[in-house]
Structures are given as C-alpha cells and as structure tokens.
Image (spheres, rainbow, N blue to C red):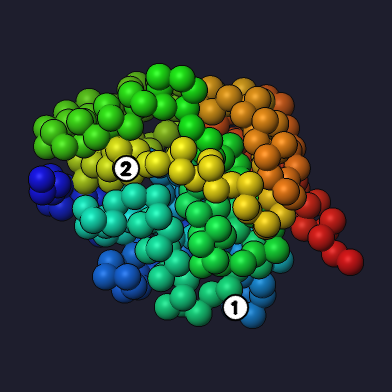
Amino acid sequence: MPLPSHDKDRPKWERDGRDWPHRAASRFVEAAGLRWHLQEFGAPDAPVLLLLHGTGAATHSWRGLAPLLAKEFRVVAPDLPGHGFSDPLPSRRLSLPGMAEAVGDLTAQLGLAPRLAVGHSAGAAVLARMCLDQRIAPDLLVAINGALTPFPGLANILFPGIARVLFLNPVTPKVFAWGADRAAVRRLIDGTGSRLDPQGLELYRRLFTRAGHVAGALGMMANWDLPALSRDLPGLATRTLLIVGGDDKAIKPDDAFALRERLPQARVELLRGLGHLAHEEAPERVAETIAAEVAALAP
C-alpha cells in the first residue's frame, strides 16, 4: 500500500524557519537520497558530538543545550527524516534500522566520526542502533529519557498498530494540524511531565500545524520495532549514560534502572524535578551531567 503524502504541507524554511533558533548555524545537505536540515556549533576541528532529537521534535529541541556542548565539541544536529525541515524517508526505509542507516549515510558523507553521541527519546534508539550496527563508534552514548525498551504489556502490541492506522489515514495528520492551537500544544507538552517556556511551546506549535511534520512523527512511531532493539542491547559495548528526568510521564524512570542491568557499560543519572524534555527545561543541568561523564572518561 502506498504511503500517504503530505509533502505540500511540510514545514517550509522560508516561512516556518524565518526566526528559527540559531538560524545562522543551519545548512542543508544532500545525503542518502534526502535533503537534510542540520545545525552545527563549535570549532570545526573539535571532537564531533552527534545530537539526535526525539519523535515530533526538530533541531529547536537543542536550542539551549547545543551551544553549551559546543564549548568543547563540534556539535552536529540534524532534523531526523520527516521531521522539521528534512525530507521524509520512503516507505521501504521507514523503520528503526532504516532511520539508523540514513543517519549513518549522512554522517559518512559529512566525514563525521562522532566521539560522543547524544539522543533524546527515540533519537537515543537511533543512536543505539547505529552503534550496534557499527555505523558509529563513539566513546560515549548519552540517552536523555531514551526510548530504548518496549512499552509494557498490551501497549507494546497495540501502540505501533494504532500509530500505523493513524499514519495510513491521510486525514489524520491534517486533523491534528488543524487542532494544534497553543492550548492543545501546552496540554501535550504538559502531559510529558515537562514545562516549557513560551518560545519552546510556540516552536512545537509551529511544527504541529504542518501535516507533513505530523505525518513524519506518526510514520516513525508506526514502524518502530523496540522489541528487536531491546533484544540486541546486551551486545552494546559502548559506554552509556542514561539521563532520566524524575518527572518523565512519557517513559517511566524505572525503565532506565532496569535497562542498566542489561547493558555492559551503563550508568543512570536521575535529574529530579524534570520531565521528558529535560534538556529543554534545564539545559545547564544536562550539560553539566554530560561534562562530568566525559571527564570521567579521561585516563
């Protein structure tokens, strides 16, 4: 079955990116058959740090954290396929391995060898898959409220199926986009356990009013196979830091502590008082946590 197209209502750089955070750091590149939007921060000759946002977000998610990390690293943050201002993947590649392969092709074309890889939620899952598939070999993988394990019970069976039904219905993204007013976006963000400032809420609202971006998020969820990733995770040899927001309502904080027991080199850092979007609520705290872990890597 052909996938629905919402290309005509994708976010447009000239319109929706007119005042995008750190706009001067943005550029567009062609790789893996896609046109990607990415942002770069820091000195060109510094060690590379790859940043991947979560489902439904874009590079704006790193507006506070990226400049802090750029004090020591060359930070590269792309919009994932189908999100923000990057092209969507074709249907045959719309999966977790397909997403990891596409990002791997992007990093290869750019000549990047990330020393650090930092991902939020589903972005952490993409990075973990890339490490397992040997597309990247960072010294440290940081998962911020990482979506690395299956949903509990029936949700693991029902949720991807529901997302796929919604994604295949061409009307769903448009209906969601029509209803994405400020109050609805605030309720959605509040439901993750996070509290964002007016700028953060406005940027999410702007993206959610574009059916193409909504379709990209739904397509990502519809084809996510977390059980397969979970089975492979014990083979992850990369040192891993699991940063957990204590008030996260999207992913249970307890999941990270259970996952730690299954990973060869993992540590959990609990940040109390923060929700699923911890890096947007308190970028300084997250940056300090990452910096401390990096310092511990030094011989």
Residue 148 position, x and y percent, is 54, 40
Q: Nearer the viewer, residue 191 or 106?
A: 106
Residue plotted at (72% across, 48% down): 264
Residue plotted at (50% across, 79% down): 111
Badge 2 local density, few (<14 within 10 Å), some, or many (20+)? many
- Amino acid marked by disc 1: Pro
Q: Circle 1 — which element?
A: loop
Residue 71 position, x and y percent, is 69, 64
User: Which quarter of the rendering shows the C terminus?
Assistant: bottom right
User: Which quarter of the rendering shows the N terminus?
Assistant: top left
Q: Is residue 218 left or right of residue 251?
A: left
Q: Is residue 257 left or right of residue 147?
A: right
Does any portion of residue 18 appear in the rendered image? no
Question: How far is disc 1 from disc 2 in space, using C-alphas?
Answer: 35 Å
Badge 1 local density, few (<14 within 10 Å), some, or many (20+)? few
Residue reaching furthest to the right: 299
Q: Is residue 46 left or right of residue 293?
A: left
- The dot on residue 223 is 2
Residue plotted at (63% across, 75% down): 43
- The dot on residue 183 is none
Residue 158 position, x and y percent, is 33, 24
- Kindly identify which residue carries mark 1: 44
Residue plotted at (67% across, 75% down): 46
Residue 163 position, x and y percent, is 28, 31
